Image: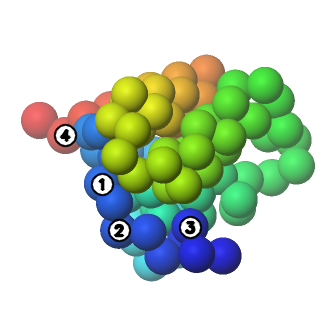
Amino acid sequence: MMILLSERPLAFPLRAQRNIYDYGSDIRTIGQAAAFIITLPKSCDSLHWRLAGSTVSGAFYHPDDTDLLNTATCALENALATDGMLAEPEA
């Protein structure tokens, strides 16, 4: 999947409470966001994760659409927070 190789930054970095492959817990790029989403357990097949996945994919395929990138980042942040996976920012 080409999306996993994307180095395009999210609108703002996020931090998850679990590691993503070799990336650590930081989610800074479209590729890292996609990697995180596709490794979620089947129990995370809820509307907020489907929205996050769809918007991350859309942001990858429409790189000039900054509104879509902002929406994707916010959707991912919301999904992480909804399921208690969003880590507190470091001070």
The numbered disc on residue 30 is none
Q: Position of residue 52 (x, y in %)?
A: 62, 36
**Residue marked by disc 2:** 7
Task: Identify which amino acid the numbered label 2 is placed on.
Answer: Glu
What is the CA distance from the residue labelled 2 to the residue labelled 3? 9 Å
Task: Identify which amino acid the numbered label 4 is placed on.
Answer: Glu
* Left or right, residue 43 beside residue 79: right
Whether the residues at callouts 4 and 1 have beta carbons within 8 Å, the answer is: no
**Residue marked by disc 3:** 3
**Residue marked by disc 1:** 9
Q: Residue at x 61, y 21 (%)?
A: 82
Task: Identify which amino acid the numbered label 3 is placed on.
Answer: Ile
Q: Position of residue 41 (x, y in %)?
A: 80, 52
Q: Residue at x 50, y 55 (%)?
A: 60
What is the CA distance from the residue labelled 4 to the residue labelled 2? 23 Å
Tag 3 secondary structure: helix
The numbered disc on residue 90 is 4
Q: Position of residue 24 (x, y in %)?
A: 39, 66
Tag 2 secondary structure: loop
Q: Against 26, is 6 above or below?
A: below
First in sequence: mark 4 vs mark 3: 3
Mark 4 vs mark 3: in front: 3
Task: Identify which amino acid the numbered label 1 is placed on.
Answer: Pro
